[in-house]
Amino acid sequence: MRRIFFFCYQVFLHIFAAAGLVLVGGFFAVRFHLTDVKGGVDPRNGEYQPIVLGTETDQTVVSSGSSDSFAQLDRRLAELSRKRSLRARNLCGIGILGGYAPASARSVLGALDMTDSDQVTAKMLLAAKIRLEESGHPDPFGSCDDGSANVSDESVLRSLYGNASGASLFPWMNDKEWSTIRSAIVKDREAIDRAAVTAGVEPRLLVSCAIVEQLRLFHSQRELFEKVFEPLKILGNANKISLGVMGIKDAAAAETEAHLSDPSSPYYLGPEYRNLLDYPAGADVSSARYARLTEDGDHYYSYLYGALYLRQMLEQWKKAGYDIVYRPEIAVTLFNVGFPQSKPNADPKVGGSSISVGDASYSFGSLGYEFYYSGELLDAFPYVVN
């Protein structure tokens, strides 16, 4: 009996020691940033370039006869010509897209109605182009560039695709995982909007980060999705190294808090943000932070930490002279790779963790871009047009 007892004691002791070693290893891994996402550059990085029109505002030209007036008129006419050219190309692209996925063409038309923005439309078509090329359709809109395709008439496009239904061009939108995420994100709309407004970021950009985290979680934990997330129509609330619906690491959350109160930090947002994440006097900060990030019933703090984390990196880049607020593929990449790899430069790269969704493979940033410009959830989280 004593031998059995001693044997059991030894087994328990070894298990306890092993568990302790894992916990200590995990602590030091987080403490010294060994768990930080290294990521990689997306193979199609070069295609994600900002589509820029002239920045001249629409204004009346006073005909004074001066050379300045004529120069101003020339600039304005050149800008209008570029706009007409881009609108024509966009309409052509929508017509071609409709041949592949009518429902996706409908989404682009809907966004055009909502924004009247040729830049937004062109970026939506770029997302479609990249997905089509990944699916084996090289240069799908090439005929719109070389003039060999007839420019589609807008009224004809609306009659063909204005009420189109069917599968989306983007495969993740056709899966049951997306149906669950979509329903749950819409339920969280109030919390998302409140967190985004508080932090000063675009709600749709914040949602893009959350949705990539959720797609990654749902597609990597199939059994849990089938048993829990799908039946309850809820988001995955990670509670290990990455916490909450936004997948924020504890160390990143602590750094986010610290940057709010440090005027010398390149991530400092200003005195009006200083006390946003303060704790009550005497609170156990570590436990309180964990509770904030993993709260099941109300995801507001998870979204707020995510929004502030994102905003701080956007602010860092803006202070360095690089405004990436309208580069969702870069912003979402930074959200994934975090503070250590947020290094402002003139040639930012799209990338981050590799994610498999069904048969398709994405980088974190490319999937964020694809959602952002998919037109999905546009009623709840519309584009903010500059």
Image: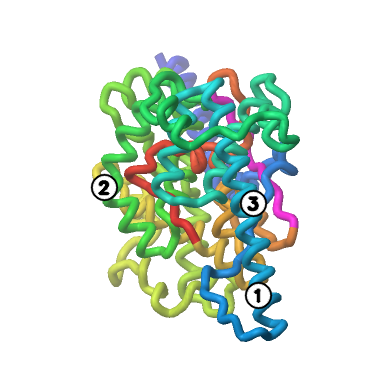
User: Does label 3 or label 2 sit earlier along the sequence?
Assistant: 3
Of 143 and 187, the residue lying toward us? 143
Q: Where residue 290 sits: x, y (%)?
A: 38, 51
- Residue 212 seen anywhere in this rendered image of the structure: no
Task: Tell me the element at label 2.
Answer: loop
The quadrant the N terminus occupies is top left
Numbered badge on residue 317: none
Of 257 and 282, the residue lying toward us? 257
Q: Name the residue under label 2.
A: 298
At 42% across and 64% down in the image, what residue appears? 200
User: Does label 3 or label 1 sit earlier along the sequence?
Assistant: 3
Q: Name the residue under label 3.
A: 51
Q: Where residue 115 sits: x, y (%)?
A: 43, 51
Of 110 and 16, the residue lying toward us? 110
Distance of mark 1 from mark 2, alpha carbons?
53 Å
Location of residue 62 by image quarter: bottom right
Q: Give the range drawn in magenta.
A: 347-357
| Amino acid type, mark 1 | Gln
Distance of mark 3 from mark 2, alpha carbons?
38 Å
Q: Name the residue under label 1.
A: 72
At 40% across and 53% down in the image, what residue appears? 203
| Amino acid type, mark 2 | Asp
Q: Where residue 187 sits: x, y (%)?
A: 26, 40
Task: Tell me the element at label 1.
Answer: helix
Marks 3 and 1: which is nearer the front? Answer: 1
Distance of mark 3 from mark 1, alpha carbons?
23 Å
Look at the numbered discs 1 and 2 and tell me whether their residues touch, using CB distance below 8 Å.
Answer: no
